[in-house]
Amino acid sequence: MRILLVGAGGVGSAVAAIAARRPFVERLVVSDYDPARAEKAVAATGDPRFVAARVDASDEAAVRALLAEHRCEVLLNATDPRFVMPLFRAALAAGVDYLDMAMSLSRPHPEQPWSKTGVKLGDEQFALAGEWAAAGRLALVGIGVEPGLSDVFARYAADHLFSEIDELGVRDGSDLTVRGHDFAPSFSIWTTIEECLNPPVVWERERGWYTTEPFSEPEVFDFPEGIGPVECVNVEHEEVLLMPRWVDARRVTFKYGLGSHFIEILKVLHETGLDSTTPVRVGDVEVSPRDVVAAALPDPAGLGELMTGRTCAGLWVSGTGTDGRPRQVYLYHVVDNAWSMAEYGAQAVVWQTAVNPVVALELLATGQWRGSGVLGPEAFDAVPFLELLTAYGSPWGLRDGG
Amino acid sequence: MRILLVGAGGVGSAVAAIAARRPFVERLVVSDYDPARAEKAVAATGDPRFVAARVDASDEAAVRALLAEHRCEVLLNATDPRFVMPLFRAALAAGVDYLDMAMSLSRPHPEQPWSKTGVKLGDEQFALAGEWAAAGRLALVGIGVEPGLSDVFARYAADHLFSEIDELGVRDGSDLTVRGHDFAPSFSIWTTIEECLNPPVVWERERGWYTTEPFSEPEVFDFPEGIGPVECVNVEHEEVLLMPRWVDARRVTFKYGLGSHFIEILKVLHETGLDSTTPVRVGDVEVSPRDVVAAALPDPAGLGELMTGRTCAGLWVSGTGTDGRPRQVYLYHVVDNAWSMAEYGAQAVVWQTAVNPVVALELLATGQWRGSGVLGPEAFDAVPFLELLTAYGSPWGLRDGG
């Protein structure tokens, strides 16, 4: 398979490191706005199948030219969500398959942002579903860890564990700490602000999609493998938009284990307008305050050596088991930072995000997964995915009782 | 008197509005990096003695040329503290008097920032005191409200109320609120961050100057004229550096009534590195995060119409009264935003800062105050200052009992 990877940040570099161990890859072009980042990711693999390139992800013509130059069959988008639409359109125009780990951005309801959805996550992508289907090409959207693996778990639960599902509740938490930093997010702060300060979205069978106030419905969830209890709150996330399209459930939620300190910081960034993406004038230049927040904080991809702990992504499912009795399970995937650093030189959160699209690419390369149109991970059979993930050395878990 | 005012922000514009009512002004050149701001401040006065000019406050040669062009005898600095030294040097080189409302910046002690002073506020200015004295010119430093009026109060207390002073404690608080804003500081956030996140400085007769952790020694101070109790904490402020040089006391402190919400916001800005003045790279540009914080928040000078409440600056003094008995007083100055908006179109905090240098300029113009070298407000007789401030329509108060 000939792949164009766009974005050589933390996740993109980990994608390269993981893919370098897989023979299905014939060519992987690692591209970035900053050519030095792309070259560094390629050099780290020491693999002749990998080459670096410079590209502006917002320039559709340049992306198409790069796809053509390297005869790529698929574009894997590892940039931040602002670049979803230009890359998605470039892949459609170029007639190649497309994968991403975050979907096109939402816009709040203009009058009732805390109760009604406006433009939802992925709406702009699903609007082009007919064109993708007509072209016979696949856009596999939201195939990181969350969204991604959590959606695979939803399909697995529906097919193998439950006869009827009450709630699909994604629950994400960690016990990661970063030595020497009071505050150092382990994932892109740009994306975290976007997820956490937008109105959280919930789906219910009777109501459809609706929104709440930020940080709503706090609950303490007990994470497995020693992580323990973490306070989780509703945030906006793609799974809530994806799962109801392919999996039958009464309710779909996403709760993120932010912890009270992180929530306080996000609230202050919002109060001071520093979460905004609207440029402000500073002296002779214009910058987006949110970009400055990201630039002022340490790059999460570089924190791996200072991090300790584990990160857990998973799906809590409640309903009626295949035996007709009430059942609750938590399907999960834990990555220990010490393991991902030792094995791949990648910190736990970015490695956990990066492994899933590589597994998906391999399933597409071998023909175990096939499809066309704009599809979420839950549109495919979960079993080969979970088997291959385990074969990559990173098994998943099931905790009965929820 | 022919005056060059540098800085046409909130305080500078209010200086122009106040000075326009005083006949001692022969010429006032209002200058700013942004010529539109200077022109707006001049136009608001409708006074032919006032002219606007563009100047870069960091360009000493340009400032000297502007002083010469308009034959100014004095430079009033109403910029933020980063521009103190170039303006101070330009005035010295040009042979004119100089006034400011904030002093040259401090740098923390490299090893023990929370217990020892490094470079103190004003140190760079006092280092040139000999040159100012030799030139026979006056640099009257820290003559806003705080520092400024509070220093005048210290001198007044020493000369007229106390035979021995135990503590000179500046206490600053308000009950100002801004309609429609969760968080909208009523004064320059750049300066507020500088004051509040630097190590607070305290002076004691036996110890000299020393520093503490930020936000140390919280106390609830009951402010007069209906403002009521506000939580105050130690912050770094010029008075602590000025008062011990001219007024005899056992201890000098400065506590700012920030309130817990503001303290939380400042802590988050610090944790996230957004208080930093070291530029970060964002895309193709470099910006100082603290400048972006200031740009993202509403301009405090423009909030006057939305503000309600009063601001109080004052000095709490304890010791032995002139009658030999223990005494505590609070000497204070309160400005009601409704009054300053109606009278001058300026919000309370900037008006309260701006009135004091205009009073001082008038005392220098009439010869009631005279001196040379680098002097603080407490080096001069307090009585004519307090009488003239009252004549400006803004009386001060004395609360016996502290």
Image (cartoon, coloured by chain):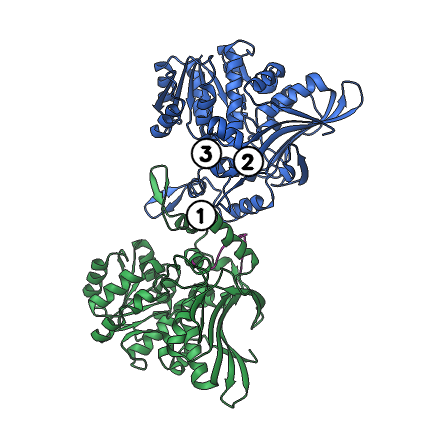
Chain colours: A blue, B green
Bounds of the magenta segment: B177-188
| Residue wearing tag 1 | B273
Q: What secondary structure is found at the residue carrying circle 1?
A: loop
Question: Residue A157: image x %, image y %?
Answer: 68, 21
**Amino acid carrying mark 2 in the image:** Glu
**Mark identifier at residue A195:** 2
Q: Residue at x 61, y 39 (%)?
A: A114
State whether discs 3 and 2 lie on one chain. yes
Q: Which chain letter goes with mark 2?
A: A
> Nearest the camera: B288 or A398?
A398
Q: Which chain letter goes with mark 1?
A: B
Corner quadrant of residue A209: top right
Q: CA distance from mark 2 to mark 1?
A: 21 Å
| Residue wearing tag 3 | A301
**Mark identifier at residue A166:** none
Corner quadrant of residue A203: top right
Q: Which chain letter goes with mark 3?
A: A
Q: CA distance from mark 3 to mark 1?
A: 18 Å
Can residue A15 be seen?
A: yes
Secondary structure mostly seen in magenta is loop
> Nearest the camera: B177 or A84?
A84
**Amino acid carrying mark 1 in the image:** Gly
State whether discs 3 and 1 lie on one chain. no
